[in-house]
Amino acid sequence: MVNFNGNLVSSQDTLFTSENRGYKYGDALFETLKVVNGKIFFWEDHYFRLMASMRIIRMDIPMSFTMEFLENEILKTIEANDLLSSSARVRLNIDRGEGGKYLPSENSKVTYSIITEAFDEPFYTVKEGQTYEVDLYKDFFIAPGLLSGLKSNNKAIQVIGSIYAKENDLNNCLVLNTNKSVIEALNGNLFLVKGDKIKTPPLEDGCLKGVMRKQVLEVLSKDVNLYIEEASISPFELQKADELFITNVIQGIIPITKYRKKTYGCQLAKDLTNKLNARIRLGA
């Protein structure tokens, strides 16, 4: 079942027409959520990112879009799909409805849809002994700026990059901005570990304002033995690192094991994963 503007309908039903602005122009935003036993992980962070993104793209926020309202709609959809007592991946999609060309018509109204699917792992894990190989994706670059950091439906680079990765037997690719700095992976933020120093690209470089990125930075900030820096990462730094890992809300922390001829460990990734799970259990 799909939640379309509060109505639960079959996933086989047609929800949109060809005039939907999300379909025609990518005039839409989305949040990907992990829900376990009826608890939405980091819901407050997701909600405020979504509201900030709607303001940035000048999308009128309906008065009904409170945190409680959207949470209830998500859980209603979870329950309708018999996933309230298990793990689920949820996509909350917000678009500007129908009407207009590039300029929305005065009659355009914000609409939302919520879809769910079962997800196997309730908590985050690091699978030791599993190869995870990446390389740089250099066919296209991302321009730094606020729009690049939004979770919008404009994901052409991620789509083409994913095809490139599959064609080259890679698990993922790292994306560059127009300044040729490494800013993120195709599906998450990037962290680089060298000794006691941890770097992640700053939002100003064009990386996604990731919810899991925020969680990891908060966990790292509590360790007085580590030096945390939000700074640009050069491709040359990748092969000098001790660890590289990717973060996203669905998978948590994904250690990169190989980049070109360089292989990496995953000790900090494992430690962070344990601390993240502890935060979740405590309701942080």
Image: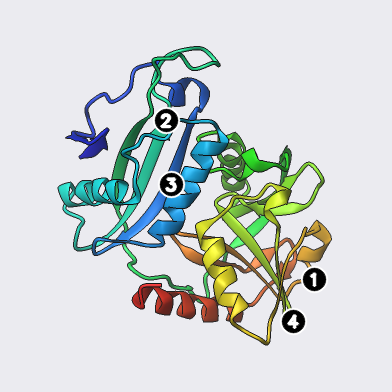
In x, y percent, where is residue 201? Answer: 70, 58
The residue wearing badge 4 is 195
In x, y percent, where is residue 78? Answer: 22, 51
Instruction: Name the one closer to the observer, 12 or 100.
Output: 100
- How far is mark 1 from mark 3, CA to CA? 34 Å
Q: What mark, if any, has residue 31 been given in the picture?
A: 3
In x, y percent, where is residue 50? Answer: 46, 45
Instruction: Name the one closer to the observer, 44 or 247.
Output: 44
Nearest-to-viewer mark from 4 and 2: 2
The residue wearing badge 1 is 240
Type of residue at label 4? Gly
Residue displayed at 68% across by 47% down: 206
Type of residue at label 2? Asp
> Which of disc 2 and disc 4 is earlier in sequence?
2
Nearest-to-viewer mark from 1 and 2: 2
Label 4: few (<14), some (14–19) or many (≥20) C-alpha neighbours in 10 Å = few
Nearest-to-viewer mark from 1 and 3: 3
Residue displayed at 82% across by 45% down: 179
> Which of disc 2 and disc 1 is earlier in sequence?
2
The residue wearing badge 2 is 95
Where disc 2 sits, the SS reads strand
Where disc 1 sits, the SS reads loop
Where disc 3 sits, the SS reads strand
Mark 1 and 3 residues: CB-CB less than 8 Å, in contact?
A: no
In x, y percent, where is residue 88? Answer: 30, 56
Mark 4 and 2 residues: CB-CB less than 8 Å, in contact?
A: no
